[in-house]
Image (cartoon, helix red, strand yellow):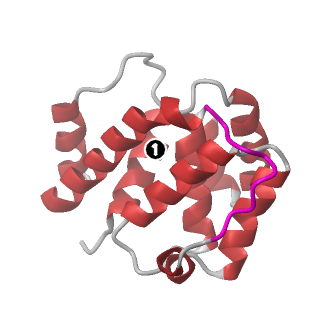
Amino acid sequence: MNESVLDVLMYLFEHTLDEESEAEPDRGELQRQLVEAGFASGEIERALGWLDRLMSESPLASRGGDSAACRVFAPEERQRLNMESRGFLLNLEQNGLLTAGTRELVMDRVMELDAEEIDLDQLRWVVLMVLFNQPDDAVAYSRLDEVMRDHLGPTEMDYLH
């Protein structure tokens, strides 16, 4: 298989949300499930590390930021995210779905992925994962759920139910 870290993350996100358990899944069990699903061990390790860093940084993102500040994207960020994707992020922030802190966490998570370019659909997944891990952003997550429904097919949205 030639999956990326983002593919592993999307698989995990879809399959762990389906479970009703409140407990955090065992890392060894997750690794076993991912190997059984056909993912390479290197991609699995990088994806789990990505998630660990997301969960450790999430409380910091809820602090917000200066709402009057203008976000300027660095050249590396502009290379990774096209204009449509950058506009999507800014639109989410302007509509209150992201704070400056969660936007920066999204950017941090995007920049850590192993892809040269992240398309809009992939960015939506990253935003969804970030918001899902925010303790205070249930409202933003539910609004983003509506945004995702407009862009994903019914089978891709099954994980949300």
Most extreme residue toward the top, as rendered? 22
Quadrant position of residue 40: bottom left
Image coords of residue 41 (percent x, y): 14, 57
Image coords of residue 6 (percent x, y): 40, 61
Rendered-image quadrant of the C terminus: top right
Quadrant position of residue 81: bottom right
89 over 17 or under it: above or below: below
Most extreme residue toward the right, as rendered? 95
For the record, the magenta segment spans 63-72
6 over 12 or under it: above or below: below
**Type of the residue with mark 1:** Phe
> Which residue is labeled 1 in the image?
13
SS class, disc 1: helix
Image coords of residue 145 (percent x, y): 72, 44
Whether residue 158 is visible to the viewer of this picture, yes or no, is no
149 over 61 or under it: above or below: below
Whether residue 33 is visible to the viewer of this picture, yes or no, is yes
* Residue at x 45%, y 55% (from the top left corner): 109
> Foreground: 83 or 66?
66
| Residue 132 within the magenta-colored segment of the rendering | no
